[in-house]
Image (cartoon, helix red, strand yellow):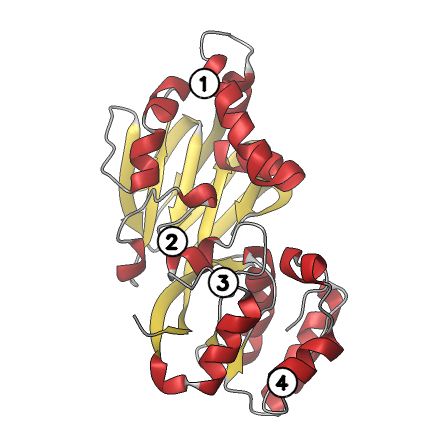
Amino acid sequence: MLNPHAGALRRRRWNARRLQRRLGEQVRVVETGSLDELPSALAELRAAGVSMLVPFGGDGTLSRVLSAAVPLWRDELPELVALRAGTMNMIASHLQMPREEPLKTLSGLLKKPARSQLLTRRAMLSDGGDAGFTFGFGAPVRFLEHYDAGGVRAAVQLIARAALSLRKYDGVAARIFEPTSVTWAGSGDPIEQSRVRLFLAMTIDELPLGFRVAPGAGDDTEHMQLIHGNMSPAFVIRNLHRFHAGKPVSGPQLVRERDTMLDFTFEEDTRWMMDGEVHPACRRLRLDLGPHVAFRVPRR
């Protein structure tokens, strides 16, 4: 599944014809110019009996392909390959995919399948049909908007500016961590938290720039790992190095728990993200555990 807007394709000027020549006849390269083309393209691949889907793009491309594939295959999804062919490549990093040209990785998996293995991760599903492995609102969305606009350099600069503005009431840090008013219920007793600066639900451990905020999330395929709270910007920024290293971070306003379902009601229209892609604002949103997804990766 080829996303012509993927960063790796634009940089290397790859197109469907060149990829088909490079990969050979055992692979069928399908280019989709818009999201509307995805369901019909995947339906054709399902009818052809494909055993592996390779979204050629980054996290957003993989999320979109998975979202369209789940209604077609349900719990019998084909294997997926997460390539480093986008901007952030969180899922590929979590799976420890090689840091090399994505075509080299894919060619190796196809030519030497015995040197590969399957790793299973659990997807999450929104009630709108969006599938992915990282979900969030509040500070994660505002950070992603800067990342999308300027890439890694802009994201790093944003962190630096936020650190320098901690003492300012209306500085960069205050704007990133502006509280969100929300009430939510999980699978157990209802939870109410009126002001949340950061909310994450994850089934992998990785975020942009390599922040490993949920160590071990990939090993628990029966729950979503939740990280949320009304912690101060200073607390988050002081602990960024620990988050990045995947070390334990605790504090009076940082909550870690796990659940299988979340039902949110926002006080105002609120944007949210799934796998590095910011979605339109809404007032209500439900998130459930989705299907198991088997990723084909090089053997370690």
- Helix, strand or loop at label 2? It is strand
Work out how far the residue at label 2 is from the one at label 3, CA to CA, in angstroms.
Answer: 37 Å
Q: Is residue 171 above or below residue 68?
A: above
Work out how far the residue at label 2 is from the one at label 4, CA to CA, in angstroms.
Answer: 31 Å
Labels 2 and 3: the sequence-earlier one = 3
The answer to which image quadrant residue 102 occupies is: bottom right
**Residue occupied by mark 4:** 45
Labels 1 and 3: the sequence-earlier one = 3
The answer to which image quadrant residue 69 occupies is: bottom right
For the residues carrying marks 2 and 4, which lies nearer the camera in this image? 4
- Count up the numbered dots: 4
Work out how far the residue at label 1 is from the one at label 2, CA to CA, in angstroms.
Answer: 34 Å
Q: Which residue is drawn at the image coordinates 40% and 47% (left, top)? A: 201
Say which mark, if any, is on residue 100. 3
152 or 289: which is nearer to us? 152
Residue type highlighted by circle 1: Ala
Pinpoint residue 217: horizontal percent, then vertical percent: 30, 54
For the residues carrying marks 1 and 3, which lies nearer the camera in this image? 3
Q: Which residue is drawn at the image coordinates 43% and 32% (left, top)? A: 198
Q: Is residue 238 above or below residue 273?
A: above
Residue type highlighted by circle 3: Glu
Labels 3 and 4: the sequence-earlier one = 4
Labels 2 and 4: the sequence-earlier one = 4
Label 4 packing within 10 angstroms: few (<14), some (14-19), many (20+): some
**The C terminus lies in quadrant:** bottom left
**The N terminus lies in quadrant:** bottom right
- Helix, strand or loop at label 3? It is loop
Work out how far the residue at label 1 is from the one at label 3, CA to CA, in angstroms.
Answer: 33 Å
For the residues carrying marks 1 and 2, which lies nearer the camera in this image? 1
Labels 1 and 2: the sequence-earlier one = 1
- Helix, strand or loop at label 4? It is helix
**Residue occupied by mark 1:** 163
